[in-house]
Amino acid sequence: MIKIKDMKCGDDNVEFTAMISHITLGKTNGAHKSNYLSIVFQDETGTIDAKLWNASQEHIESLKAGAVVRAKGDIIKYSDNRQMKIISIDDVSYQHSLQLQFLAKAPMNDEMMMTELKQYVQRISNPKLYVITKHLIEQNFEKMKIYPAASKNHHAFTSGLAYHTLSMLKVADALMSVYSELNADLLYAGILLHDIGKTVELSGPVVPSYTFEGQMLGHISIAQSM
């Protein structure tokens, strides 16, 4: 099975397994209109736009964002980019553990990042800040380990929330080495908790979207109510 990053224009009958990250239904022009699906496939190496022409009703009903599929297609050049003409799709699955295998990941191991985050919690000396921060991190530990930091652009990959938080903590260390008057407890607690509301604002690592609470309140207001 080929990975998406290795697909090249001119490759025919390419067999692959990937997850659908986006899908829309359309109709062709002309007298004999037919359904087609515009699909974005993704795996841990990247994404590719694809078209399934003459989509059947079964395809329309069974293929949704988040579906992991085994498929075959031809790679063509369209508007100076790669595009896939889908030949066949089968073995559709929505198993969560399988979906996670096709997501882009943070450049650090999730367990190592969470261990480091806990170490920063231990560095908070103010008793009240320590108890509040420790409680909220423990309460949201499993979500922080796998959630993205946003639905797109900003650390929008598995464990992106932990990676973003840890990166900012390291920036705080650098700042305190220059500005010794800074309050380390406030910096550490503030950074550790500043995006904690995203564990409610976002739906999760698989095809992340904004929840109802996220759209109505936003992660800052959510964090204040935790």
Image (spheres, rainbow, N blue to C red):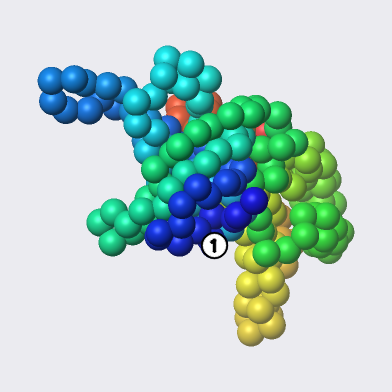
Mark 1 is on which residue type? Asp
Q: Residue at x 45, y 30 (%)?
A: 215
Residue 31 in view (yes/no)? yes
Q: Residue 199 at x, y = what percent?
A: 64, 38
Q: Residue at x 16, y 28 (%)?
A: 29
Q: Residue 93 at x, y = what percent?
A: 65, 28
Residue 62 is left or right of residue 119, and the answer is: left
Picture quarter with the C terminus: top right
Can you name the residue that lies furthest to the left here?
A: 31
The residue lying toward the viewer, choosing from 212 and 36, is 36
The residue lying toward the viewer, choosing from 109 and 179, is 109
Residue 56 is left or right of residue 139, and the answer is: left
Question: Residue beneath label 1, please?
Answer: 6
Where is residue 92, by image quadrant?
top right
The residue lying toward the viewer, choosing from 103 and 193, is 103
Rendered view: 149 above or below 201: below
Q: Residue at x 29, y 54 (%)?
A: 78
The residue lying toward the viewer, choosing from 16 and 116, is 16
Can you name the residue that lies furthest to the front here?
A: 13
Q: Secondary structure at mark 1?
A: helix
Residue 183 in view (yes/no)? no
Mark 1 neighbour density, 10 Å: few (under 14) some (14–19) many (20 or more)? few
Q: Residue at x 54, y 62 (%)?
A: 6
Where is residue 105, by image quadrant?
bottom right
Q: Residue 181 at x, y = what percent?
A: 66, 77
Q: Residue 217 at x, y = what percent?
A: 48, 31
